[in-house]
Every structure is written in structure tokens, then in C-alpha cells.
Image (cartoon, helix red, strand yellow):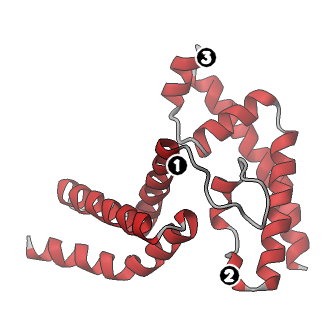
Amino acid sequence: MTEQNSDIAAVFLRERSRLGNFILREVADPSAAEDILQDVFHEFVQAWRLTTTIEQAGAWLFRVARNRIVDRFRKKKELPLEQDGEDADDTLRLDLALPSQEAGPEAQYTRSVLLQALQQALEELSTPQREVFLAHELEGRSFKEMAADSGLPVNTLLARKRQAVLHLRARLQSVYDELEN
């Protein structure tokens, strides 16, 4: 048990600052951010003790944090912080891999170009593809849940999501390439 506790402590020390900063950027209220951080680590400790180990603990922590943030916004019916003065819209949950706004003017420019390209790419999707993609990626809905609600087979929903991902990947790759040059 002591080895397990030391493993948990090591992950906590390694990820606490980065995860806390991520949550604070999304929530903006330091008290709420700390509450979310504690909830995430509490869930992590419980999961670790049940499964003996979690592969890619950092990724697991960030996924749980994203889910907690979304849950908070759903409960309070508030929107995440507006990004770059834009209206809060569907791109907000997808921008997590984008450069930080605090990283300087070049990063802010890159971020705004990518968000604009992402919004355009989402609008190019067929309505069914866009709805499935946004429901799964932004709302965190499972394919089973969407299938139950829509009456469509899970495989149909999976195919729509796959097509959406392929389109977005191809569309955004050219933007990334342009930005790198």
C-alpha cells in the first residue's frame, strides 16, 4: 500500500501545477478551480486504488478535469471564458490543444487563426456529422446515449463522427502547415 501511495503522490506532485493552471484558465474563479482540482485528484486516488494503476495518468487527469469543468458549466448554465473577445461558441471545448493566450502575440495570433479555421471547418460538415461530432466531443455524450436518443444505430453515429474527424483533420492540417511556414 505504501508503494501505491508514493506512486499517487508522485503523480500529484508532477501534475498539480499544470492541471491547476489549466482549470483556472477555463474557470477563472480560483475557489471553484481549487474545488475542481481537489475533485479530480480525489477521483484519481479512488480510481488508482481500484485499478492498481492508470496508464497515462496525466491524460487521464486532464480528461476528468475537462469533464468536471463542463459539468460545472452545465449546472450553473454559465459559459466558459470568452476567448480573444469572441462570443463563447462551440469551438471553446476544442481549443484545449491550442497555444495559450498568455504565450505572447504570436501565440495569440496562431490561436485566433486556428479557432477561425476550426469554426469554418465545422460549418463545412454536414449537419448530421457536425451534430454527432459536437455531441461527442463537446458535450461528452456517449454513442450509446446518442443512439438511444436518435434511434440511429451506434455504427451510423460512429461513421458520422469518423467522417467529421477526417474532414477536420484534413482541413486544419493545411492551416497548421501555413502557420509553420
Instruction: Indicate whether 87 appears above or below 35.
Output: above
Q: Is residue 60 left or right of residue 81?
A: left
The percent coordinates of residue 169 (x first, y second) are 77, 53
The percent coordinates of residue 46 (x first, y second) are 21, 57
For the residues labelled 2 and 3, say whether their Cβ atoms are less than 8 Å apart.
Answer: no
Residue pointed to by mark 1: 73
In the picture, residue 123 is in which quadrant?
top right
Q: Dot 3, crowdedness within 10 Å: few (<14), some or many (≥20)?
A: few
Q: Secondary structure at mark 1?
A: helix
Q: Is residue 56 visible?
A: no
Looking at the rendered image, the disc whose residue lies closer to the viewer, 2 or 1, is: 1
The percent coordinates of residue 108 (x first, y second) are 78, 76
Looking at the rendered image, the disc whose residue lies closer to the viewer, 2 or 3, is: 2
Residue visible at 40% across and 77% down?
15
Q: Is residue 45 left or right of residue 26?
A: left
Residue visible at 31% across and 65% down?
38
For the residues labelled 2 and 1, say whether their Cβ atoms are less than 8 Å apart.
Answer: no
Q: Is residue 108 visible?
A: yes
The disc label shown at residue 113, or none: none
Task: Please state which of residues 90 and 2 is positioned toward the viewer in this rendering.
Answer: 90
Residue pointed to by mark 2: 102
Q: How many marks?
A: 3
Q: Amino acid at mark 1?
A: Phe
Q: Amino acid at mark 3?
A: Leu
Quarter of the picture holding the C terminus: bottom right
Q: Is residue 174 left or right of residue 96?
A: right
Q: Earlier in the sequence, mark 2 or mark 3?
A: 2
Q: Secondary structure at mark 2?
A: helix
The percent coordinates of residue 73 (x first, y second) are 52, 49
Residue pointed to by mark 3: 152
